Amino acid sequence: MGAQLGSNVGTWMQTVGAQWTLVTEPNAATLVSLVQVATTLPVMLLSLPSGVLADLLDRRHLLISVQTAMALTAGLLAVLTWAGVTTLR
């Protein structure tokens, strides 16, 4: 339960950070909404295939590998943002 809480807090922080970055841009309402769509759409599209994989593979290894990939991706995004490499366009 603690790992799930930590994962969710990290995801929420990333979403809020992305939305916060866009608040000063023109059409901010649309851009902030698109961040939420980008966060939700993969869950909606990949939930059924993920359920099939969870039934076929060892759930523990699948969860560890997916969470590791997500953490590495979030870390890379944080480093690139800190370095000023990421832009809005």
Image (cartoon, rainbow, N blue to C red):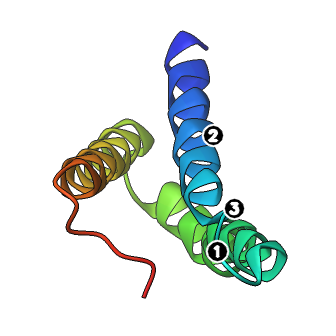
Crowdedness of circle 1 by 10 Å Cα count: few (<14), some, many (20+)? Answer: few
- Residue at which label 2 appears: 12
Q: Earlier in the sequence, mark 2 or mark 3?
A: 2
Distance from Cα at disc 3 to Cα at disc 1: 6 Å
Please name the residue shown 33% across and 49% down the image.
74
Please name the residue shown 56% across and 37% down the image.
13
Question: In the shown orientation, is residue 56 left or right of residue 40?
Answer: left
Q: Position of residue 12 (x, y in %)?
A: 63, 40
Distance from Cα at disc 2 to Cα at disc 3: 16 Å
- Residue at which label 3 appears: 23
Q: Which amino acid, mark 1? A: Glu
- Residue at which label 1 appears: 25
Secondary element at tag 3: loop
Nearer to me, 41 or 59: 41
**Is the residue under label 1 in contact with that under label 3 (CB below 8 Å)?**
yes
Please name the residue shown 25% across and 44% down the image.
75
Q: Position of residue 31 (x, y in %)?
A: 70, 78
Nearer to me, 49 or 16: 16
Please name the residue shown 65% across and 58% down the image.
19
Q: Which amino acid, mark 2? A: Trp
The image shows a total of numbered marks equal to: 3
